């Protein structure tokens, strides 16, 4: 009987990740469905599965490392031909390939009833003036968003009626179909993955349970906000499906170009003409001010050092 490490092409001291990677590669290469039912491929695949079922189990691997095949084929009911207790091949494939294919494999799949779903996040692009960015401001915006239908309270069914369980998927929202060795799971085509059917839809939302409306929101712009900044308003996105929480609203700030000033980080740049005499001898010139206030009359004078 061949050495299990040799079968998988790994060193004795390899870690679990290397073991899984080797098994994945060999199992895909020698899978019977990929080799036209070839008996040699089937035998090789069984050998690979046997090796991995032992080496992937820490206790069995320790016994194998110490006693060889006798350590896992002995009277204790180890893993081996003729009475051995290997992992189910579906379980092994779920374990090894689940991170690639998700819940596709037959034995590992479990029907999942569709429950509440979080609403979509929304994006709103807001342009503000340099003055608003400097001092901060409160701006009103109008955002179109999905809202829970008030007529049917989000059920999608006409008032007085209720959605029914989908007979195709039994309310799970997903169906499983066998394709050779694998059992592939996909969304139910009849109910669209919701697990229920609206036979008598609401006249306002047409069975969707949501309507799209415009909402007015007050957004506080903090002082000193920079171009490209993002403001998150939690729970102001689209309504969730089937009673799920609302998504978030992300506001992306852009600062409009200014006629006089140019921003450079926390600094403001301004081009001001300087008379030749002051440029030569030094003195003070009048320069524009971005914001007026108690200490500024809007016509500030700044010293120019020459």
Image (tube, rainbow, N blue to C red):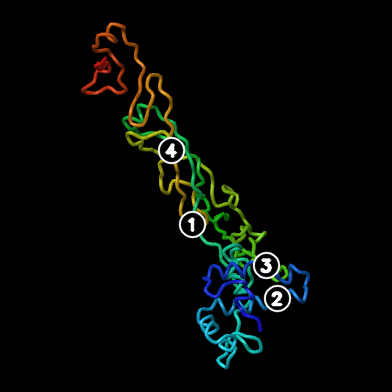
Which residue position holds label 3?
28
Tally of numbered tags? 4
Mark 2 neighbour density, 10 Å: few (under 14) some (14–19) many (20 or more): some
**Mark 1 vs 2: CB contact within 8 A:** no
Looking at the image, residue 56 sits to the left or right of residue 89; the answer is left
Left or right of 260 on screen, residue 182: right
Q: Residue at x 24, y 11 (%)?
A: 282
**Vertical placement of residue 15 versus 133, above or below:** below
Residue 119 at x, y percent in the picture: 50, 51
Question: What separation in Å lies between label 4 and label 2 (alpha carbons)?
Answer: 66 Å
Quickly name the residue at label 1: 243
Q: Residue at horizontal 34%, vertical 25%? A: 268
Residue in the foreground of this view, choosing between 48 and 292: 48
Lower position in the chain sequence, tag 1 or tag 3: 3
Mark 4 vs 1, N-terminal side: 4
Q: Secondary structure at mark 4?
A: strand
Packing grade of label 1 (10 A; few <14, some 14-19, many >=20) is: some
- Please name the residue that numbered disc 2 is placed on: 44
Q: Which mark is residue 177?
A: none
Q: Is residue 27 left or right of residue 222?
A: right
Relative height, residue 55 to residue 233 (above, below): below
Give the residue furthest to the top.
277
Q: How many residues crowd mark 3 within 10 Å: few (<14), some (14–19), many (20+)?
A: few
Q: Confirm or deny contact between disc 2 and disc 3 (CB under 8 A).
A: no
Q: Percent x, y for residue 267? A: 33, 28
Q: Cβ–Cβ below 8 Å for labels 1 and 3? A: no
The tag earlier along the polypeptide, 2 or 3, is: 3
Q: Secondary structure at mark 1?
A: loop
Name which of mark 4 and mark 3 comes first in the sequence: 3
Q: Earlier in the sequence, mark 1 or mark 2?
A: 2
């Amino acid at each position: 009987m061949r050495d299990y490490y040799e079968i998988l092409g790994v060193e004795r001291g390899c870690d679990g990740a290397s073991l899984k990677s080797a098994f994945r590669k060999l199992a895909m290469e020698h899978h019977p469905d990929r080799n036209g039912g070839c008996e040699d491929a089937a035998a090789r695949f069984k050998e690979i599965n046997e090796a991995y079922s032992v080496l992937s189990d820490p206790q069995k691997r320790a016994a194998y490392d110490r006693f060889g095949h006798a350590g896992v084929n002995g009277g204790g009911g180890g893993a081996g031909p003729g009475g051995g207790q290997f992992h189910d091949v579906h379980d092994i494939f779920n374990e090894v390939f689940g991170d690639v294919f998700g819940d596709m494999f037959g034995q590992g799949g479990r029907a999942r009833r569709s429950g509440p779903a979080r609403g979509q996040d929304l994006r709103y692009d807001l342009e503000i003036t340099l003055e608003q960015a400097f001092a901060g401001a409160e701006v009103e915006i109008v955002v179109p968003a999905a809202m829970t239908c008030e007529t049917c309270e989000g059920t999608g069914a006409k008032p007085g009626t209720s959605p029914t369980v989908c007979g195709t998927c039994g309310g799970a929202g997903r169906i499983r179909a066998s394709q050779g060795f694998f059992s592939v799971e996909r969304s139910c085509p009849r109910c669209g993955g919701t697990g229920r059917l609206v036979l008598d839809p609401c006249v306002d939302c047409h069975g969707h349970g949501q309507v799209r409306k415009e909402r007015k929101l007050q957004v506080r712009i903090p002082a000193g906000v920079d171009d490209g900044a993002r403001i998150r308003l939690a729970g102001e996105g689209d309504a969730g499906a089937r009673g799920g929480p609302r998504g978030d609203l992300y506001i992306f700030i852009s600062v409009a170009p200014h006629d006089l000033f140019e921003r450079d980080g926390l600094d403001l740049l301004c081009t001001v003409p300087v008379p030749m005499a002051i440029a030569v001898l030094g003195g003070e010139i009048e320069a524009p001010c971005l914001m007026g206030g108690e200490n500024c009359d809007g016509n500030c004078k700044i010293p120019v050092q020459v």
